[in-house]
Amino acid sequence: MYDVAIVGAGPAGCFIGKLLAERGFDVAIIEEHAEIGHPVCCAGILGTSGLGELGIKPGEWVLGDLKGAVFYPPSGDAVPLGRGKVEALVIDRASFDRELAVGAVNAGTTLLMKTKCLDISRGRGVIVKVKRTSGRDEIKARLVMGADGPASLIARKTGLLKSPRCISCAQVETIADVEASTAELYFGRAFAPGFFAWIVPAGDVCRVGLGTSEGSPLRKLADFMKKHPVASEKIDADKVLHFTAGLIPHPFTRKIYADSVMLVGDAAGQVKPLTGGGIYIGLSCAKLAADVASKALEGEVTAKALRGYERAVAKRFGAEFKLGMYAREVLQKMSDDDLNSAFELLGRPDVGALVLEHVDFDHHGELIKALAKKGPGLLRLIGLHKLMGYVRKL
């Protein structure tokens, strides 16, 4: 009988396991795979400010740094943006995840590998039904935490998943001719409808991937690598070293708590809507969840006792989620011509300066508000009347 059973040994699951174990709770992390950190579909970028805020010091899992980005609209005209300082780190996700797992174990957490969650039942506490190499088993706990990704079994089995809306992603590691310390982002409906494609230098290789709201991400990624007029000249499509696929959940598509249940990380839809990055927000929300869970475990772990978790997340990231989703919905509706016009605007020195003044790798809300405030005047000034409707929606 554990105090807490956490399903999923990704960053959020291991981080909250460590925090709760340090507070004296008996914690088990249930992980279906044989190895921490695999499989994962992630560009592997962490903002330096976010890491500092979380108290995580860079380790051997750092592969490189990013000082800026180059945006490619459908026209192919490059729009560089950067402040000449390190904004983010490119990481080895497997090593990063393992370090968090080691931290959880050292704090006293029990890590159950090759243990697949099949179902849960709730009554006085929770029974997690699992399949292990030795056969089927049951793990009892007072509280279960779903840290099992966008398609969370815990969310589905407890009725917390309201909508399965996700962005589908695919990524490969390969060789590409791009500048170190610079990420490249590609937009356009032909290759990445509803999202974008990326090339990120990661040590000796590059991560090339995309997200899409339509069709097969694998097929679109293959087309992007071979047919994009700019990217295909940089990518060696014949030297693919590693392939992964995954999902990016939409915020607000699931409730994050119920009697004896909490969701954290991707399972809770805790991602940055504009970029899909989930590590920083997931770990931040894990800290909030640990605070609420610690108090709830002093008595009955009811929905009422866990309600403060939703309130804390809404206070910390609610505006960020809302503004980010509005902005993403606008981008999803824009035609390629409109995207070209928008990035033409971004290339102006005054707009670029506005963006650099307000941009923060881990917090997009202030930038979105600044652009929405200044946008109408700028659009009128340069005659881009077609984009006015999009800006007003923000």
Image (cartoon, rainbow, N blue to C red):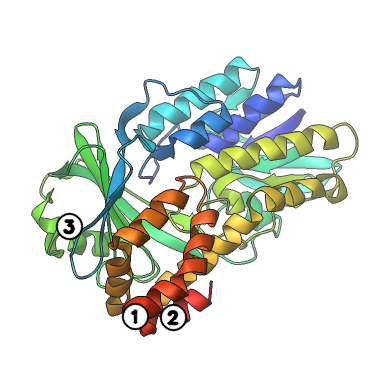
Crowd rating for badge 2 (residues with CA inside 10 Å; few <14, some 14–19, many 20+): some
Foreground residue among 43 and 65: 65
The Cα atoms of the two marked residues, 2 and 3, are separated by 33 Å
Tell me the SS state at disc 2. helix
Q: Which residue is mark 2?
A: 388
Q: Report whether 244 appears left or right of 320.
A: left
Residue holding disc 3:
225
Q: Considering the numbered disc 1 on the image, is that residue within a helix, a strand or a loop?
A: loop
Q: Earlier in the sequence, mark 3 or mark 1?
A: 3
Residue 304 pos. (x, y %): 87, 50
Residue at the right extreme of this rendering: 299
Q: Amino acid at mark 2?
A: Met
Please report whichever mark, 2 or 3, sits nearer to the chain's N-terminal start.
3
- The amino acid type, in three-letter code, at marker 3 is Met
Identify the residue shown where x is 22% and y is 41%.
206
| Residue contact at pointers 1 and 2, CB within 8 angstroms | yes
Q: Position of residue 128 (x, y in %)?
A: 69, 41
Q: Position of residue 22 (x, y in %)?
A: 70, 20
Which quadrant of the figure has residue 84?
top left
